[in-house]
Amino acid sequence: MVTNKMAKYNRVTIIGVGLIGGSIGLALKKRHLAKEVIGVFRRASTLKRALKRKTIDKGTLSVAEGVKAADIIVIATPVSFIPKMAAEAAGHAKKGAIITDAGSTKKWIVAKTEKATAKRKTLFVGAHPMAGSEHAGVEFATAGLLEGSPCIVTKTGRTDKLALNKIINFWQALGAKVSVMSPAAHDRSIALISHLPHLAAFSLAAAVPVKDIAYAAEGFKDTTRVASSDPELWADIFLSNKKEVLRSGRMFEKRLRELSIALARGNRSQVVKFLGSAKSKRDKFTQPLL
Amino acid sequence: MVTNKMAKYNRVTIIGVGLIGGSIGLALKKRHLAKEVIGVFRRASTLKRALKRKTIDKGTLSVAEGVKAADIIVIATPVSFIPKMAAEAAGHAKKGAIITDAGSTKKWIVAKTEKATAKRKTLFVGAHPMAGSEHAGVEFATAGLLEGSPCIVTKTGRTDKLALNKIINFWQALGAKVSVMSPAAHDRSIALISHLPHLAAFSLAAAVPVKDIAYAAEGFKDTTRVASSDPELWADIFLSNKKEVLRSGRMFEKRLRELSIALARGNRSQVVKFLGSAKSKRDKFTQPLL
């Protein structure tokens, strides 16, 4: 909890103010962390909606104008735009400004962004706040979205130590529980823990005939909830972490096959053993454990 | 809504008073449907817990004693015990008593039970109230569990028409939305809509290494929620609907493979199309549509 009212930052700029960007803005303001929160938008209509929700103090359609004089720049656009946005922001940011992001994959984003910003005076430290929902858009943003949720901050050979600490501090100040790891380690973990459940949920919804959905109850509802997520957004996430997502998919298929074989053989004790071991793992998860 | 306070039934007996049986008892009492609700138990400890939660008026460990003079007998034990319990209940029930059940699979249960009760004076009509949660036990029972949830009642060549109508009426009186279909049609639908999500959730929890669970957020949480269900219970459900569960599993794997191939090829438009079609199906499900 931040108790003193002295703002930590003069200006924080958020590029892409949707569910995550908007929630960062609301948390910055609620926690009195920034004197000024600026939003950068692609469309005037989104700018209007973000201002209406009071997620930012001011908004602009110009990256150059938006990042000027910012201490911290957070890029919370869809994954595929992040490196390009970071490069553009770095070209206009003040010396010593630090750029972070909120992208769900890290290896691709961090490699591209480090390359694009290498000759700039700004520093980049990748991040992935693991909060969200199947709903997109600033209308669903809340000041509490990041509170208590895991946030992975990435460290590479090129990461500046001071900037790393400042970015760890930034996400912690927003209420997230920060872990530091390499982009590759992040992508492997996240493929399993986040991308794979989405892959499974989308495939599950795809497999069930519409006529049977009438009989669906809580089990179907929860298991497929994330299949209501934005297809464009998730296509980019899957594609930007393709190798690990496919690897996780194979691990999943292997287990599915194992359970199916035990079932086909009518081997009850093997089925019980499989389900029991899965249950004991799932029971470990009540709240994020960090 | 039942508004008159005249009880529909003199006595309803519930064999197996856990989450579902207990919720039936609570709903019968809340809606003033039965003058007396009797519970039949395997263990004295469960009897005590069910009485404490006021899910029944009286409890007994004897099937013979419990079903005596009952108008309706509901068997809400784990799936594998249902035919045996039904046969035992039929041997002691009064003439004209109707037996129904709450088992999640129907073909196996209905065939076995119809055979076992064929020479008795009692009538059997299978049912599957599609309500529940990953929690087991009478402690989680609520009067509202069945309210608005789908309930499939089965009809076969042997089903007595009057008994069928009485049982449809019974589940409707408890607040469920009843559909009538054959046991085979039930098992096929339910394999897809309920058993498959469980199969996927258990396999998903099994596929994720424990160390990565620390980074799990809402997506993992919801997608694997039902993997916290009771392994013994679900082994029996899967095994009693083996053929359809395996068939659903193959349909799911096919879709998973389809998505993985589009992803491996880096075919973004195909990935978006797949996810979009899955999303539009999932979005159809807000509440059960019956």
Image (cartoon, coloured by chain):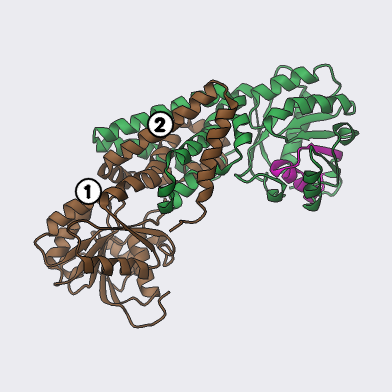
Chain colours: A brown, B green
Q: Amino acid at mark 1?
A: Trp
Query: Circle 2 sits on which residue?
Result: A253
Point out residue B230 in the picture as x, y percentages from the top left corner: 61, 40
Choose top left, top right, bottom left or bottom right for residue A198: top left
Horizontal arrangement in the rendering, residue B144 relative to residue A116 (left or right): right
Residue B133's disc number: none
State yes or no: residue B22 in magenta.
yes
Label 2's element?
helix
Earlier-in-chain disc, 2 versus 1 = 1
Task: Give the residue drawn at x 37%, y 82%.
Answer: A5
Query: Circle 1 sits on which residue?
Result: A108
Task: Give the residue drawn at x 42%, y 80%.
Answer: A3
Q: Are marks 2 and 1 in contact (CB under 8 Å)?
A: no
Horizontal arrangement in the rendering, residue B35 relative to residue A117 (left or right): right
Q: Is residue A26 visible?
A: no
Q: Amino acid at mark 2?
A: Glu
Q: Chain of mark 1?
A: A
Count of number-bearing discs: 2
Quarter of the image with the C terminus of chain A in it: bottom left
Horizontal arrangement in the rendering, residue A266 relative to residue A148 (left or right): right
Point out residue B257 in the picture as x, y percentages from the top left corner: 36, 29
Marks 2 and 1, Cα distance to the nearest angstrom? 25 Å
Q: Give A195 or A273, whichever is nearer the viewer.
A: A273
Point out residue A13 in the picture as x, y percentages from the top left corner: 25, 69
State yes or no: residue B83 in magenta.
no
B95 in relation to A65, above or below: above
The segment highlighted magenta reads B10-33
B24 in relation to A151, above or below: above
Choose top left, top right, bottom left or bottom right for residue A85: bottom left
